[in-house]
Image: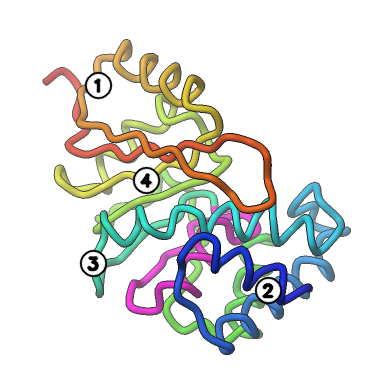
């Protein structure tokens, strides 16, 4: 992994980091490169592309997490898969706790290995389906998971009313369309849409933050 590429990207995003974090990211990318051929974790095979399209893409929401969560909060990453965004944000925010929800055993085992080899101590893997969760969390996030309207009932169950749901989305129009469908399903919520720029990537990104989601209110 090109550490200069990552560090310059984090600098552009005004995200604080140290050498230990860069080492953790380097180990993470190494694990991705090693297991990707067998597990099909990401479509990109070049480590620089992984840094830009996945690590920096996830990191770009750092300031949203800073605003919407606080130290000690437990954050659930639904369908963590390759560890995006859970592993990335857990490295950058060691004062939060992350639960990486991944029902596929081989990917859950991959995430366990990443946590072990990177030395990330504030993340844990939960090998269950979202429908099986009964715990509640201080915040929930997901990236490249199901459309929000298809999992809304389960999210309402695990997320207290005023806790944030932080969704990684592509173009703002797509995010608005998805939320429109959610409203059409009878859900009401408070929303905040945040446009973010990913260094070295000429594609638009939107983070949708929802609170107080409930049906029929």
As drawn, the label of residue 166 is: 4
Q: Secondary structure at mark 3?
A: loop
**What residue did someone put label 2 on?**
28
**What residue did someone put label 3 on?**
70
First reached walking from the N terminus: tag 1 or tag 4:
4
Residue in the foreground of this view, choosing between 15 and 217:
15
First reached walking from the N terminus: tag 3 or tag 4:
3
Residue at figure coordinates x 56%, y 82% from the top left: 21
- Can you see residue 13? yes
Specify the farthest residue to the left: 217
- Can you see residue 137? no
Q: Which residues are magenta?
A: 80-104
Q: Secondary structure at mark 1?
A: strand
Residue 119 versus residue 151 in the image, above or below: below
Residue in the foreground of this view, choosing between 4 and 109:
4
Mark 1 or 4: in front is 4
First reached walking from the N terminus: tag 3 or tag 1:
3
Is 193 displayed left or right of 161 in the figure? right
Residue 17 versus residue 70 in the image, above or below: below
First reached walking from the N terminus: tag 2 or tag 3:
2
x then y, percent, for residue 72: 25, 74
Q: State the separation of the CA atoms marked 1 and 4.
A: 17 Å
Q: Are marks 2 and 1 in contact (CB under 8 Å)?
A: no
Residue 37 versus residue 146 in the image, above or below: below
User: Residue 209 falls in which quadrant of the image?
Assistant: top left
Neighbor class of circle 2 (other Cα within 10 Å; few <14, some 14-19, many 20+) is many
Is 162 displayed left or right of 46 in the figure? left
**What residue did someone put label 1 on?**
187
């Amino acid at each position: 992994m090109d550490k200069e590429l990552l560090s310059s990207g984090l600098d552009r995003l005004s995200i604080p980091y140290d050498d230990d974090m860069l080492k953790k990211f380097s180990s993470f990318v190494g694990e991705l490169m090693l297991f990707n051929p067998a597990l099909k974790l990401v479509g990109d095979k070049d480590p620089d592309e992984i840094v830009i399209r996945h690590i920096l893409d996830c990191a770009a929401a750092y300031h949203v997490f800073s605003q919407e969560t606080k130290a000690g909060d437990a954050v659930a990453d639904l369908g963590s898969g390759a560890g995006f965004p859970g592993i990335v944000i857990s490295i950058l925010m060691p004062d939060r706790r992350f639960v990486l929800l991944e029902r596929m055993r081989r990917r859950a085992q991959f995430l366990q290995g990443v946590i072990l080899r990177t030395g990330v101590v504030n993340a844990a893997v939960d090998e269950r389906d979202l429908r099986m969760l009964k715990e509640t969390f201080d915040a929930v996030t997901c990236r490249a998971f199901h459309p929000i309207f298809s999992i809304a009932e389960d999210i309402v169950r695990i997320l207290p009313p005023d806790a944030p749901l932080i969704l990684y989305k592509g173009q703002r129009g797509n995010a608005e369309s998805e939320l429109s469908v959610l409203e059409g399903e009878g859900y009401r919520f408070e929303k905040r849409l945040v446009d973010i720029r990913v260094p070295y990537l000429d594609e638009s990104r939107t983070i949708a933050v929802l609170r107080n989601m409930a049906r029929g209110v």
